[in-house]
Image (tube, rainbow, N blue to C red):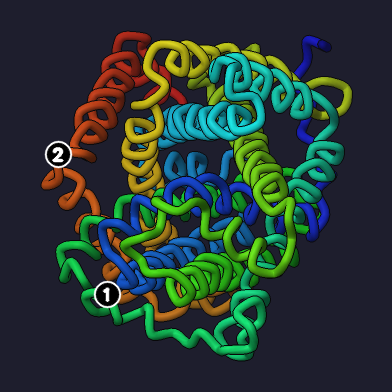
Amino acid sequence: MQNNQQQLHRGLSERHIRLMALGAAIGVGLFLGSANAIKLAGPGILLAYLLGGGAIFIIMRALGEMAVHNPVAGSFSRYARDYLGPLSGYLTGWNYWFLWLVTCVAEITAVGVYMQVWFPESQQWVWALAALIAMGSVNLITVKAYGEFEFWFAMIKVVTIVVMILAGLGMIVFGFGNHGVATGISNLWAHGGFFPNGAQGVLMSLQMVMFAYLGVEMIGLTAGEAANPQKSIPDAINSVFWRIVIFYVGALFVILSLYPWNELGTTGSPFVMTFERMGIREAAGIINFVVLTAALSSCNGGIFSTGRMLYNLAQQKQAPALFANTSPGGVPRAAILVSVAVLLFGVVLNYLAPAKVFVWVTSISTFGAIWTWGVILVSHMKFRARLSAEERAKLAFKMPMYPVASWVALGFLVLVVGLMAYFPDTRVALYVGPAFLVLLVVLYFAAGLNKRDSAVAQAA
């Protein structure tokens, strides 16, 4: 590695960025986490995904407006620093780094779980370690090579989900795989109604729903390496939102129409059952492969995110200067290697408590994501306040319904945090997440970063 501070290379095309965001968001949240959410809300989970998707759209448009105006690698961490102050940028950057570390633990945990389907006598932690090494290696190549890997990883998931939706609609409307008898959609209300567990069930599911959307904000991090951010960022934000809603809501609509919600998880994967009814004998193996690529894709994106965030923090002198170094290919290798080294802790968790890992990490990741999304909204408000009327009129990618939409989205995030505090299963996130933020604040002042940042501000 060269000991210099070269810039990141703008090697990501529009197709890379679109599929990267899809790859990060369509991971274990749909394939592994949705069954638990369905148990809580029944068919009402569709409403939960729509509500969550609406809030995410507002957040992404706020981020997109800032990213097009100022396309930098640190994205929301840099915007938090510029508009809310150095401490906010520091907390947001390190929090996001921690968030993706925890999320990657969930992804490599999923790899271990699904590899045991093929190799039941093997140890889960072995596969988790193998996944970590493989994805870490991919990230150490040029960013264009990483973008290609992520493009094809995500494409596998997207094609599978689209085929499943189309096949399911064929069964629902034309009776394919059911001797020509259309199954209809009566399962949506035939087993206790559309809201079998009432409003409480929908509210309880919101934490898992928001975990499923985690990753779409990665579009902001690609701004510093996008070949044409002024075009690719708006296109990606608008298209990815609708695609994710269609994939999640569409896939779950088909599943909940074909199978009673209260039987899901007891008779095998609904994805497998749907493909088997189409006459595909190797359905279980195919879906297992797809789920593996889903988890690997999300982990791949997570390692990308952690590396870029450390790079940005180092540029802001809020992390060791070593992390601002890049390879001749423009890859922040030191930042990536440190992130992968810390992720080895996730492999240890898989060894010590494999059954608990997924529940813990989804809750902690959701808290970290909510902090990030909240900071994006507040930073955007401050960003708008600094602009003159003429500058606001010239914005290339305006957020709709500002500022009402921003306050609605912030209120929704506060609701999710309150629900996480109310329900015992997710309360662990409100111990770990805030504790980590407090630790960061202590380190910020102990390291004298507050004095250095004040001196820099006065000099400017």
Task: Determine which quarter of the picture holds residue 132.
Answer: top right
Which circle's residue, 2 or 1, is located before the other in the chain? Answer: 1
Q: Position of residue 55 (x, y in %)?
A: 38, 66
**Three-letter code for the amino acid on which mark 1 is drawn:** His
Disc 2 from disc 1: Cα separation = 27 Å
Q: Is residue 175 above or below residue 296?
A: below
Q: Is residue 274 left or right of residue 204?
A: right
Judging by the rendered image, the residue that carries numbered circle 2 is 424
Residue at 40%, 44% in the rendered image:
369
Farthest residue to the front: give it. 179
Q: Is residue 236 above or below residue 374?
A: below
Picture coordinates of residue 64, whole percent (x, y): 56, 62
Q: Residue furthest left?
A: 422
Q: Nearer the viewer, residue 377 or 391?
A: 377
Q: Quadrant of residue 163?
A: bottom right
Quadrant (top left/top right/bottom left/bottom right) for the N terminus: top right
Residue 117 visible to an observer of this rendering: yes
Is 230 situated left or right of 448 in this image? right
User: Which residue appears at 55% of the width and 54% of the height?
Assistant: 216
Front residue of 416/438: it is 416
Task: Name the foreground residue: 26 vs 403.
Answer: 26
Q: Residues within 10 Å of mark 2 (few under 14, many from 20)?
A: few
> Which residue lies under the disc numbered 1?
191
Residue 373, can we see it? no
- The amino acid beneath tag 2 is Pro
Residue 387: x and y, percent? 46, 65
